[in-house]
Amino acid sequence: MEDEAIQYTPSPPVVDKLFVYGSLNSPYNLQLLTGQTLKTEQAVLYGHRRIHPKSGYPFAIPWSGSKIEGSLAYDITPEILEKLDEYESEGNLYTRQQVTVHIGEQPVEAYVYIGIPEALEPYFRKGIGKRDRIEEFIEKRINHLLEDKAARYLKYDHDHELPVQVIRELLSEETHSLVREYFRESGMPVFILKHELEDADIPSLEWIRYDPNATQYADEYIQLAVKFMIFNQLEERFRHEFRPRVKVSDEYYRHTISAMMALKLLVSHYQHLKSAMFQLSADRYDPSFSYIDYAVAAIYIAKELYTTDRAKEVVDWVREHRHIGRVPLGAELEFSPIGGRAVTAQEGDEPRFDGFYYFYDFDLMRRGWKLGAHIDDHGFLTTTHTRTRGFLELAFGRYKLLGDVSKPATRDPWVLAQLIDLAIRYMEIRPHSLHISLQTEKNVPFQKIETPEYLLCLLLLGGDLRLDDEGILREMRIYQHDIIREGNNVHFSRFNRHHKDPEDMSWSFVVEYQFPRLLFDYDYQPLIMALKGLQLAANPYPLKNVQDCPYEDLHREIETFLIQWATHPTPISAHTLEAFLAVIEHGLDKEAAVVGSKQWRYAQRILGRIEEQLKRRNQRIQTYHAYS
């Protein structure tokens, strides 16, 4: 009997090529996503059409008589395909199919990702771009790597996403830093991502048991930590769910708009927030709670506070009020329950936080990094291992505190003013001082200060004019030596510089005005616009920190003049006020000529408020002298 013939089914040919036509048709993007530099060659896919909506991602669909010009990528391994399938949401947004493409006349078998139009429709929104999808892909990879770490610390059977959410919140600074590094390095091997995340420590509260002095302040620190975490959760929601509305150019700090939206929602529903914190015991230190327990509470509270209707209301509010400017802006806010005594305080002088002595022990720099939170003791920026007493400072745009790496927060005075106001309301700590920074224009030299009285006008807008304990009118920022250092040096304004990128040693230069008082329920738009108009029109030398300044003697005279005026303020002449307003208007007109008529109308409206504030406060000085 003859053996039956054995039927052999030939194995399908191994396809190790991929036809790319959209975001993958970029060597940079392909390297970002695969971690490898792949050989590519121009190719054509016949019988298909490339659809690229005005807003959204390009996709291919079968279309008789059409063709797509793209590239053929070689040496596509199963590991690379797995990464790209994840990026393209294979099976959900795109399907990977085998097709025949042509290099010249030669047919070649390759894979291609074909779009599923119905699934892609939600992405057809203005402002959604290639970088957004790549960023989402990187964040998903990081989340996968966090799963093992999360499983070691907590397990919630009813909410399998919660453990990763908690660990991601506690490692928020590290994960965002890795996303930035991923783009900067054009990709990053998985083992480096995994190593960095494994090395990042999870904060603990065990140390409090061995520090009885810290226990009496622990409630305040816990509240601050939980509020930072709730804020972080809402900022993430706004950034992901309203990506087109919060996006800014790479020149600016990417979290500014989403941070403002999160603060707006939280401040608008602050009593709800406080009630939820109380109900979950997240407003006090409990020795039986771990740091992770407080993070879980913060995530639950954030979910309760954030609703689609509330979020849309905030987004609409921002859209209605935003303005376009041309001067990059920044701000630093200082808080202390004991005001200017913060940097000289001794143990126990300050009843709520003991001068923020335990700020780093409670891991608050990592909790508040999106707002640039750190302790300012008016020395050099300390490390997280150093205890010191001073102000709690929020530095908008400073995303890497050690090394002074920052970007401008915004170019919109309304946005900056809202951030300032909302941060004061949310922090619930006595506000003390405000620094406003304006980025200088390249190759535009500073000019001599011809009219020192203009600085008095700025003090009327942003200083602290009030009666002292003896009923004498003073300008307190100068009179109380808040901005006076050794040798009667008045730190009214200074020249400063920042790195925008930790790997880039070039500097961006700013003029930092240090005289303003930080006040609750105060609109800083008039002051910001006045500073901007003055810089654009007159560009005066900062009083401090300008190398080889030819007007040092004049600046010393101006500082003496400011001290004398702050000690006994006198009315500013109507002529000076009118001249100051004319300079401001000239500067703002220069900006409006570049930006457009909408900015001109906004500037005119704020100019009216500047004039009103100047005259009202000048009248206060006149009235004081009339009755004293």
Image (cartoon, helix red, strand yellow):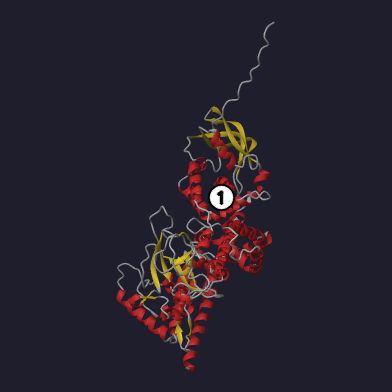
The percent position of residue 355, horizontal first and vertical second, equals 48, 70
Q: Quadrant of residue 84?
A: top right
Residue found farthest to the top = 1
Looking at the image, residue 433 lies above or below residue 230? below
Tally the marks.
Answer: 1
The residue that appears at 51% across and 45% down in the rendered structure is 194
Looking at the image, residue 356 lies above or below residue 465? above
The percent position of residue 317, horizontal first and vertical second, equals 62, 65
Residue 332 visible, this orientation: no
Please identify the quadrant where the N terminus is shown.
top right
Q: Which residue is mark 1?
A: 132
Question: Closer to the camera, 167 or 395?
Answer: 167
310 relative to 239 in the view: left or right: right
Amino acid identity at mark 1: Asp
The residue that appears at 59% across and 39% down in the rendered structure is 85
Question: Closer to the camera, 40 or 485?
Answer: 485
Question: Closer to the camera, 607 or 505?
Answer: 505
